[in-house]
Image (tube, rainbow, N blue to C red):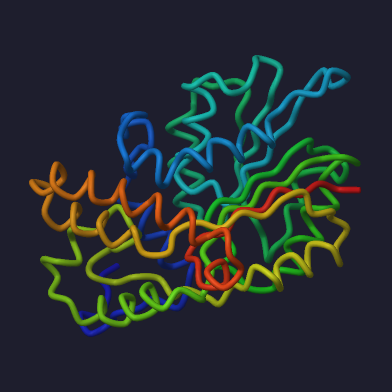
Amino acid sequence: MKYNSNKKVETNQKIFFDKIYQRGETASILNIPQDDFLYFYAVEYIINGLTYVCKQSENTKRHIILDYGCGGGTWIDVLLKREMINKETHIVGVDISESAIDLCLKKFKNETNVQFCLIEENKIPSIEDFSIDGIYMLGILHHTENHKEIFTELCNKLKSGGRLYIFDLSSSNPIINFSRKLFTFMPLKIKNKFSDDLVIEGVIPEKLKVDPTETIKILKETGFTLFTITYHHLFVFVFIWCIQLMPWSKSLFSPIASFFYKIESLLLRFSIFQKISHVFCIKAFKK
């Protein structure tokens, strides 16, 4: 399947992600050194969230973790290779994309504690209710609709006290919103510099509107209790883009990015800046 050369944004999320995973392996988080600024800026807080979900209960003999929107299994790979889970933990990866599931089945064919299945119209019929100990969903909400339906299904699958971690992108950052519009007019040579950021054949997926406040409201309505919410990324990502465009500039931009990250962190203590942050992370649990 080839995209129309004039197409700039794919509105059908399933078509887009099937295309992404038909091309095979995606970039691995494991390739980013832990002392690299990019790891500290964009990965470390996700690892913290995964730890929250995967923390073992002393009374749980068989811990079951759900990766909702597993894609090519990037974060399952992290959990396994960094030994963030013990041998008693079972991981279930689910996704709307058959291509993603096929890729994962091949990638993890030798893992006995991992299984995969499809999401069917926001339902996961192959998973029993009240059977899951923890769920994480990373960058999923801005590709999906009917969040109340999704959270209701996830709450049904969780055991009492089960944990949920959400990492997602808000729709409120003016730099991001402008850049996405500008990006669609960029030449293919520039777009291909961002192939790891969901760009294929010059096409990007539609980014659906996500509001952190509304997300918390829906979570509470569907049976979850909020534990914490944190906000990240105001403008420092611009320096990351510069490095992606010009890899030779990493030694120049990394120290600058580190300096401005400290300023960004201070600003994000205030609600006025939280409202325009690009990233938010939620830790919640089922009552």
Q: Residue at x 67, y 60 (%)?
A: 120
Q: Which residue is drawn at 62% across and 43% down?
A: 67
Q: Is residue 240 left or right of residue 129?
A: left
If the image is split into quadrants, where does the N terminus sit? bottom left
Residue 210 on image: x %, y %: 59, 72
Question: Height in image: 199 above or below 68?
Answer: below
Q: In this view, does 283 lie to the left or right of 85?
A: right
Q: Which residue is drawn at 45% across and 51% down?
A: 99
- Dividing the picture into quadrants, the one containing residue 173 is bottom left
Picture mark count: 0
Residue 10 on image: x %, y %: 39, 76
In this view, the residue in front, 83 or 102, is: 83
In this view, the residue in front, 30 or 11, is: 30
Residue 132 on image: x %, y %: 79, 38
Q: Residue at x 47, y 38 (%)?
A: 44
Determine the residue located farthest toward the top in the rendered image.
87
Residue 76 on image: x %, y %: 53, 34
Question: Height in image: 51 above or below 89?
Answer: below
Question: Height in image: 161 above or below 176?
Answer: above
Q: In this view, does 227 lie to the left or right of 160?
A: left
